[in-house]
């Protein structure tokens, strides 16, 4: 499948068709992705926001507590 970049405000984006979203079970309204450069292209990996929050809050607990003061 070949897609073209589309203008979205001052940025550019690629629209992912609904059948592909359904195939990958990505039906969340605002799905987050980790974007990495791989083999001369981009690789999109869905991110579970709850597990990401748990990881970040555990890793940076002291800093987050200081910010909360």
Image: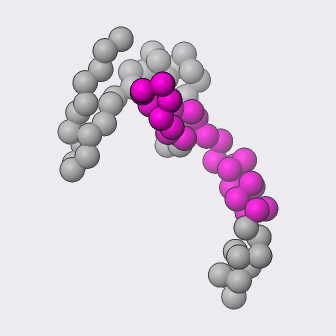
Q: Is residue 27 visible?
A: no
Q: Is residue 32 visible?
A: yes
Labels in figure, total: 0
With respect to residue 27, does 33 lie above or below? below
User: Left of 38 or right of it: where is 48?
Assistant: right
Residue 1: x and y in percent read 36, 11
Residue located at (61% from left, 40% from top):
47
Highlighted magenta segment, given as a residue range: 34-59
User: Left of 39 or right of it: where is 50?
Assistant: right
Q: Nearer the viewer, residue 47 or 26?
A: 47
With respect to residue 43, does 30 lie above or below? below
User: Left of 7 or right of it: where is 19?
Assistant: right
With respect to residue 68, does 36 lie above or below? above
Residue located at (47% from left, 18% from top):
20
Q: Is residue 27 magenta?
A: no
With respect to residue 37, does 11 lie above or below? below
Residue 16: x and y in percent read 39, 25
Quadrant housing the C terminus: bottom right
Which of the 4 quarters of the picture holds residue 66?
bottom right
Residue 52: x and y in percent read 68, 50
Residue located at (77% from left, 70% from top):
61
């Amino acid at each position: 499948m070949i897609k073209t970049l589309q203008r979205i405000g001052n940025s550019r984006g690629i629209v992912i068709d609904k059948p592909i979203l359904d195939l990958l079970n990505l039906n969340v309204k605002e799905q987050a992705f980790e974007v990495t450069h791989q083999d001369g292209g981009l690789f999109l990996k869905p991110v579970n926001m709850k597990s990401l929050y748990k990881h970040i809050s555990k890793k940076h607990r002291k800093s987050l507590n200081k910010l909360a003061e």
